[in-house]
Amino acid sequence: MSERGAAIPGLEQEPRQRPQAKPRQTPRAKPQETPEQTPEQSSDAGAVVADGRSLRRTGLLVTLVLGGLTATPPLAMDMYLPALPEVTEALHAPAATVQLTLTACLAGMALGQLVVGPMSDRWGRRRPLLVGLAVYIVATALCTLAPDVAFLIAFRLAQGLAGAAGIVIARAVVRDLYDGVAMARFFSTLMLVSGVAPIVAPLIGGQILRVTDWRGVFALLTVVSVLLAALVWAKLPETLAPAQRHGGGVGEALRTLRGLLADRVFTGYVLTGGFAFAALFAYIAASPFVIQKIYGASPQTFSLLFGLNSVGLIVVSQINGKVLVGRVRLDKVLAVGLATVILAATSLLLMSTGALGEVGLAPVAAGLFVLMSAMSITLPNAQTLALMRVRHTAGSASALLGTSSFLIGAIASPLVGVAGEHTAVPMALVQLTAALVALACFVGMCRPWHTPAGGSEPESPEEGN
């Protein structure tokens, strides 16, 4: 994978500075002026550069590792869904209480990113990631042994908090390794790997329940996470050089986050992606009731349509990465994606209100397919344009991207059920509102017509801190 524009931002400066240390003018002054650049740390920085170049040459391995990191926490959500009724019976808990195990995991994934992101900017990517994976393994194993629903909720919260490390650091590693068009292409490829998880997870969970109980789901997740941790330990080196790391404690982390949010364009892309994700979350939360309760489809038909929508997302993401990116401005592709989501949500709203007369399942399924497919040119490009604004705080920037998406999505998803299970109007209304707000943030805050031809040029908002 030899992208000419793919460079670890700022890392190449370390090897170039070493030859300049040879002049005899002030041989001892340089180490005193920059104490971070001891001989050991300079060699570490050179090793990071070499590792980054090696990783880019082994693109398939990087894609599988980073895709596994981003897919494992969603696997923990979706694989567990078929087991919910059994958990309710086995732990003698009401369904509403068992649903809190999903909420706890989702909240953990949202909040954990705010903690892990700044940590990875301070200590590098590798150590926080390995610690997070270790805690994730322990928490998942404890879910297998949970004696009652209260313990299961607590362990699921810990599982989400630790699983956030994989999500946030995977994006930060992509920012370390790639830039511009190369980064957009890699995000589209990453969606191919992580997009398979929603398709296979419920199927795997259902098959596990044929031979064992709900605890077997968490046992398999434990084994998968152990294998992934071993792969990361062996094959994923550090990608952030010591010279690019940030010292300080909680106060410094908060100042970094505040500096990122002070960049209007960066915040605009974060909100654009977050509200677009809310439209996607509305689909995930409401589609089982819309397709099965309102249109009378069987669970098998719902699973088939869910899988088709995920396939559409994957296919269009590959069109985005291999055809559009590099030929069309990223902000134009993002605008087309938002416009398509708005059109699909508008059609769904018109169908659900009866403005188009009586419609069957097929038109509604087609509208959902278009909406889901458009997400694959909306979400990765919004993330890419946001991360192009930063150079040295990719972990914190990735944390803001992830946390905002999960929190906005978590707020939007309960709204789809405010009118009960027998109307699709709330789902379509939430989707349309979220997409319109995303477009307003994109146009009003990002102002893409002011940016150079490539899209959003980095302005390094953290430098002002």
Image: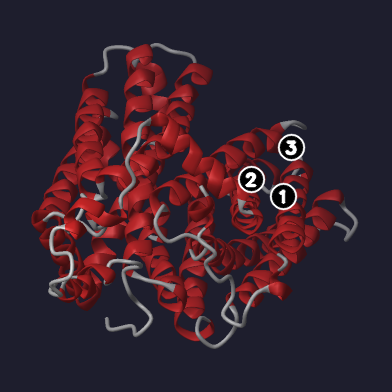
Residue drawn 41% across and 56% down? 199
Please identify, in this view, whether the residue under mark 2 or under mark 3 is nearer the observer.
2
Q: At numbered mark 3, what does the secondary structure look like: helix, strand or loop?
A: loop
Q: At numbered mark 2, what does the secondary structure look like: helix, strand or loop?
A: helix
The answer to which of marks 1 and 3 sits earlier in the sequence is 3
Inter-mark Cα distance, 1 to 2? 9 Å
Spot occupied by residue 355 in the image (x, y as percentages of width and height): 90, 56
Name the residue that disc number 2 marks. 282
Residue 70 in sight here: yes
User: 405 or 261, which lies in front?
Assistant: 261
Residue drawn 52% across and 69% down? 312
Spot occupied by residue 211 in the image (x, y as percentages of width and height): 21, 37
Residue drawn 79% across and 62% down? 347
User: Vertical placement of 32 versus 415: above or below?
Assistant: below
| Residue sticking out furthest to the front | 25
How crowded pointer 2 is (Cα within 10 Å; few <14, some 14-19, many 20+) is rated as many
Name the residue that disc number 3 marks. 422
Q: Amino acid at mark 3?
A: His
User: 199 or 62, which lies in front?
Assistant: 62
User: Vertical placement of 185 versus 305: above or below?
Assistant: below
* Residues at marks 1 and 2 touching, judged by CB atoms closer than 8 Å: yes
Name the residue that disc number 1 marks. 434
User: Vertical placement of 304 versus 23: above or below?
Assistant: above
The answer to which of marks 2 and 3 sits earlier in the sequence is 2
Q: Amino acid at mark 1?
A: Ala
Inter-mark Cα distance, 1 to 3? 22 Å
184 vs 341, left or right, is left
The answer to which of marks 1 and 2 sits earlier in the sequence is 2
Q: Amino acid at mark 2?
A: Ala
Spot occupied by residue 86 in the image (x, y as percentages of width and height): 37, 25
